């Protein structure tokens, strides 16, 4: 009886040590995740991340996550996770500066309703598929300030265990832009590139005093950020 009791104690101790090791490893893995204010996936198991305007259009999922301030059409976030078990994921909306660093605004200053860090409750398990996965969907809360934003998704209410980040932009029409797209004047780029000339009229917006320092221009190809020209 004593030997059996000791064996049970040893198995219990081993179980506790193993659980502590697994838990510690998960915490250590989460701590090593560096938050990136970009379109970024932090784990291989997270797939098919989409952030788009939830409209009735057939190709709505391919629209850019750019919307006007006060626009009622919500943004929807979709992503898949490989596996058969649903997990607890939370969403946080972060306001950013012009250079995509986190701003100093408080959440109450840019969110219409104080519902940041909300649990994703809409998900579906795959059915009759070769690879098991869970599909998650969430509506992004509306904001009341124009600017750059990042949607951040993290696991188990632990912000350090982030699994994906996705950018979106909310704009207000304060200036007018006149573009002119034409063939590149460079000989080598003539058949591969385009030249974009533009002018910015800010006469109706009286808060720009030194445009060379206060106006920033970003040109994107097919809404990509990896090769944006600034």
Image (cartoon, rainbow, N blue to C red):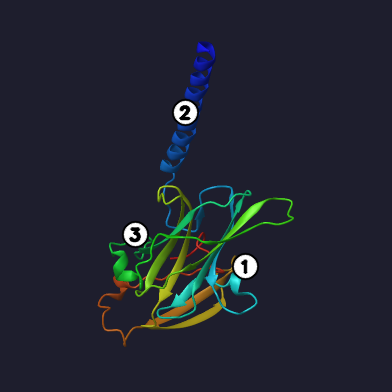
Mark 1: which secondary structure? loop
Looking at this rendering, what residue extends furthest in the bottom direction?
204
Crowding near the residue tagged with mark 2, few <14, some 14–19, many ≥20 C-alpha atoms within 10 Å: few
Viewer-side residue, 167 vs 137: 137
Label 1–label 3 contact, CB within 8 A: no
Q: Position of residue 218 (x, y in %)?
A: 44, 69
Q: Is residue 7 left or right of residue 202?
A: right
Give the total number of marks visible in the rendering.
3
Q: Which comes sooner in the sequence, label 1 or label 3?
A: 3
Q: Secondary structure at mark 2?
A: helix
Tell me how far mark 1 sits from mark 3, CA to CA.
36 Å
**Closest to the observer, 142 or 229:** 142
What distance separates the C-alpha of mark 1 from that of mark 2? 62 Å
Residue occupying image coordinates x 33% and y 70%: 110
Front residue of 43/7: it is 7
Residue at point 37% right, 71% down?
Answer: 147
Query: Which numbered circle lies on residue 179?
Result: none
Residue marked by disc 1: 192
| Label whose residue precedes the other's in the sequence (3 or 2) | 2
Cβ–Cβ below 8 Å for labels 1 and 2? no
Of badges 1 and 2, the one in the foreground is 2
Dot placed on the residue nearer the N-terminal end, 1 or 2: 2
Residue behind mark 2:
16
Q: Residue under circle 3?
A: 102
């Amino acid at each position: 009886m004593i030997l059996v009791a000791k064996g049970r104690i040893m198995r219990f101790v081993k179980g506790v040590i193993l659980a502590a090791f697994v838990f510690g490893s998960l915490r250590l893995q989460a701590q090593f995740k560096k938050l990136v204010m970009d379109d970024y996936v932090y784990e291989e198991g997270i797939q098919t991340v989409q952030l788009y305007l939830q409209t009735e259009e057939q190709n709505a999922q391919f629209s850019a996550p750019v919307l006007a301030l006060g626009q009622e059409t919500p943004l929807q976030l979709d992503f898949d996770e490989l596996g058969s078990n649903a997990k607890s994921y939370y969403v946080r909306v972060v306001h950013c500066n012009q250079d995509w660093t986190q701003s100093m605004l408080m959440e109450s200053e840019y969110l219409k309703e104080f519902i940041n860090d909300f649990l994703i409750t809409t998900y579906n398990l795959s059915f009759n598929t070769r690879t098991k996965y869970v599909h998650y969907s969430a509506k992004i809360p509306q904001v009341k300030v124009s600017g750059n934003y990042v949607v951040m998704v993290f696991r188990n209410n632990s912000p350090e265990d982030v699994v994906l980040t996705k950018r979106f932009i909310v704009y207000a029409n304060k200036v007018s832009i006149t573009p002119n797209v034409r063939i590149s004047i460079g000989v080598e780029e003539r058949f591969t590139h385009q030249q974009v000339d533009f002018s910015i009229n800010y006469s109706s917006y009286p808060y720009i005093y030194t445009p060379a320092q206060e106006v920033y221009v970003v040109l994107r190809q097919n809404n990509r950020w990896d090769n944006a020209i600034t």
